[in-house]
């Protein structure tokens, strides 16, 4: 099938589902990598402190390239913000059932 510009597009539902599954898989893998980097960073930050923890050490501990670590987190400050965000989300999830009862 052709779109309004005369270019071929995905028509079959099966092909579209396959593309969606690939995107979903990549997203899940990306989330796993991001979590691995964050958890590795938190471990090093706890053990070494902020000043002595480098992005290079974090990437090495996570088993990813330095560029990959920077792809997910632009700096150590971004890692700290991600930690605060995760903690906030966990707190909301834990407190929401109690607040809904009140």
Image (cartoon, grey):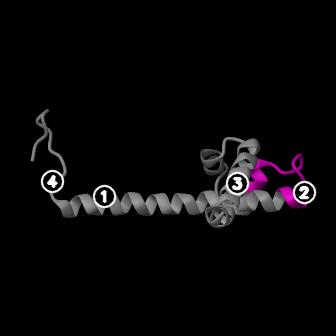
Label for residue 46? none
Residue appearing at x 76%, y 42% in the figure: 77
Outermost residue to the front: 102
**In the image, is residue 51 part of the stretch drawn in magenta?**
yes
Residue appearing at x 30%, y 58% in the figure: 19
Q: Quadrant where the C terminus lies?
A: bottom right
Secondary structure beneath disc 3?
A: helix
Residues tagged 3 and 4 counted as in contact (Cβ below 8 A): no
Residue appearing at x 73%, y 51% in the figure: 84
Q: Which residue is mark 4?
A: 11
Q: Which residue is mark 1?
A: 19
Q: Which residue is mark 3?
A: 88
Range shown magenta: 45-58
**In the image, is residue 47 part of the stretch drawn in magenta?**
yes
Label 2 or label 3, whichever lies nearer to me, is 3
Residue appearing at x 72%, y 49% in the figure: 79
């Amino acid at each position: 099938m052709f779109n309004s510009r005369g270019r071929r597009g995905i028509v079959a539902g099966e092909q579209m589902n396959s593309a969606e599954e690939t995107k979903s898989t990549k997203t899940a893998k990306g989330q796993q990598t991001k979590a691995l980097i964050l958890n590795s960073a938190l471990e090093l930050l706890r053990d070494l402190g902020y000043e002595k923890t480098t992005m290079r050490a974090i990437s090495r501990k996570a088993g990813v390239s330095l560029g990959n670590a920077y792809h997910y987190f632009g700096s150590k400050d971004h890692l700290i913000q991600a930690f605060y965000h995760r903690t906030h989300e966990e707190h909301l999830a834990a407190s929401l059932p109690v607040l809904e009862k009140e």
